[in-house]
Image: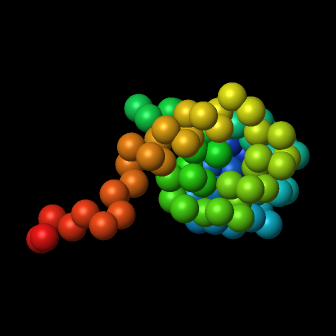
Amino acid sequence: MAEKDATARLRRAVKENNLFLVKRLIQRTDMRNPDPGTKRYTSLAWAAALGHEETFEFLLTAGHDDEELSRVCILCTVDAPTPGLHPDD
């Protein structure tokens, strides 16, 4: 059965990098859409964490909370592997 909750559908669309659906759903619900889980990621944070650049850029230009950008950058920096460092070296 299809999800009727627009917030859950938006979260899934962001995670699946379905930009077409994201564009439609932000007209029906708050685009920030904090996740009810323990991390409380917003749509922008999920797009960044999953490396969905096109969705990330769209959310920024569509007016996603400007203050969220600093939090997302910190999340990406902390979660990203350090280039050039390999555990086997």
Name which residue lies at 60% across and 39% down. 42
Q: Residue furthest top?
A: 67
- Of residues 17 and 1, the one nearer the viewer is 17
- Of residues 31 and 73, the one nearer the viewer is 73
Name which residue lies at 55% across and 42% down. 73
Quadrant location of the C terminus in the rendered image: bottom left
Q: How is the image coloured?
A: rainbow
Report whether residue 35 is seen: no
Quadrant location of the N terminus in the rendered image: bottom right
Please say if 66 is above or below 82: above
Name which residue lies at 41% across and 32% down. 38
- Of residues 4 and 36, the one nearer the viewer is 36
Percent position (x, y) of residue 86?
21, 67
Q: Is residue 76 left or right of residue 19?
A: left
Name which residue lies at 38% across and 48% down. 79
Q: Residue 88's quadrant in the figure? A: bottom left
Q: Residue furthest bottom?
A: 88
Q: Is residue 85 left or right of residue 71?
A: left
Q: Is residue 47 left or right of residue 37?
A: right
Report whether residue 44 is seen: yes
Percent position (x, y) of residue 43?
64, 45
Percent position (x, y) of residue 80?
39, 54
Please say if 87 is above or below 12: below
Q: Residue 5's quadrant in the figure? A: top right
Please say if 62 is above or below 24: above
